[in-house]
Image: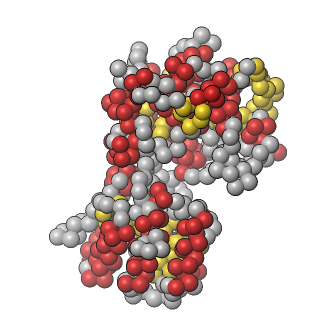
Amino acid sequence: MKVCMISSETVPFAKSGGLADVIGALSKKIASQGYDVRIVIPRYSSISPEHLHLVRDKINVPIDFGYSQIRVLQARIPDSEVPVYFIDHPDFSARPGFYGGHGSHTYRDNHRRFALFNRAVFALCREIEWIPDILHGHDWQTGLVGAYLREWEQQSGFQNSKNVFSIHNIGYQGIFSKHDLHSTQLSWETCNSDTAGYDSRLNFLKCGILNADALTTVSPTYAREIQSPEFGHGLEEILSERGAGLVGILNGVDYEEWDPRIDPHIPVPFSPEDLSGKREAKRALQEKAGLPVRSDLPVIGMVSRLAAQKGFYELCDPHRGALKRICNEMAVQVVILGTGEKWIEEELIRLQTHSSNLKFFSTFSNTMAHLIEAGSDLFLMPSRYEPCGLNQIYSLRYATLPIVRRTGGLADTVENYDPQTGDGTGFMFDELSPEEIFHGTERAVSTWYERPEHFQKMQHRAMGKHFSWDDSARKYLELYRMVLEQDEKLELRS
């Protein structure tokens, strides 16, 4: 089986979020089982061509009302044999940023940039005489792959290829004017659907959903949630039409990177058999944060993008935010690491000046992220929605009990504390409000103080949980095989 992973990001070459981690780890795992997996991404200006190998020069790709010329460079995912092909064109390589530059959220011509990228995948495969069985696209930036396969490429060697499309975050859809359709060389009928109601916009994510042979998202609960108006962001109707064709496959975790027994970023390794190293990590975290070194206070950690999706409005609302109450009314220490929306950063800095038990790091540091996971007693994730989430899984491995809202992948990976038995791996609350965040945190903190035997039992139970890429890769391979055996799309359209 030949699998082409098509993505706007992959580690270690281009990363703005968890998508990049998924592409690299999943591709390596599938390739390790003997399959021919190759990745295609754009070459952004931040990716130096110095150490890349030239594969092909001057390939013409149909776009707009003519052709654009690309070249293709190649490297490999470190510690693997997985090739990464870079689509090299000035629309990507001569601009700052991945999706926007100079503080802009997006480039106005992203429809053309990523249409060119999607179409270039087929030109590349023909040039290197490698026709994949599975074209696996990820998020809106690859939403036209299935449409090109259906409308243009069936008679050009790809008649036996199938398209799998994965939604990592439905909140980002790639929406443009209907007039922008002309540059894609696709028909409106291919990109839209009468069953979804009248919509005059070009929506890359919708196009990906409509033309996929199989559709996945990153956790079983999120697969159910996005079929509802609350979480579907306007696409719940066409997602519901997919029925069993929408599959939730939980992301895995790279335990070579996130394991306290071998983590080079923490002072002393630790394991379920000996948690003394966790106490040393807590001491180191308190020292690094400039907080009093006190073992008698629980530390609550957060490593997050600072955005409304992550619950920061409810945490940081100047009038009734939960974070101020947590710091003022609970005997805790709080350490937050992250970057994002400016008003959230400013409010966290303001709160920090008034709360001696709060420390905010407005940057990103991989070492600090590991230290927070290892040195905290509790980890707070009050997400508005969370397709999968990784930090709560890291926390479990580091015996740092998550406090989470019951949504998406958080609900699939954290087991709620049972005060009668002491079972569970974390603490859940249902509603996203400042009051619910406060009371959910209060319940976790009171358990730390009043029922240490339960807390320790949960820590050992948490460390025993395993969310590896082995299980995820097996499920993707099962899906690939099922798609290749189908004559029709998996419950795509009525």
Residue located at (41% from left, 28% from top):
197
Q: Which image quadrant for residue 452?
A: bottom left
Question: Is 189 placed above or below 333 here?
Answer: above
Q: Position of residue 295 (x, y in %)?
A: 43, 86
Name of the residue lying farthest toward the left: 420
Q: Nearer the viewer, residue 399 or 330?
A: 330
Q: Position of residue 52 (x, y in %)?
A: 78, 41
Residue located at (47% from left, 39% from top):
167
Residue located at (65% from left, 20% from top):
185
Q: Is residue 487 left or right of residue 67?
A: left
Does residue 125 show up? no
Q: Position of residue 259 (x, y in %)?
A: 49, 62
Residue located at (60% from left, 33% from top):
177
Question: Is 233 placed above or below 272 here?
Answer: above
Does residue 341 show up? yes
Q: Nearer the viewer, residue 130 or 414?
A: 414
Q: Quadrant of the C terminus?
A: top left
Q: Position of residue 121 (x, y in %)?
A: 65, 27
Question: Is 114 placed above or below 351 here?
Answer: above
Q: State the count of labels.
A: 0
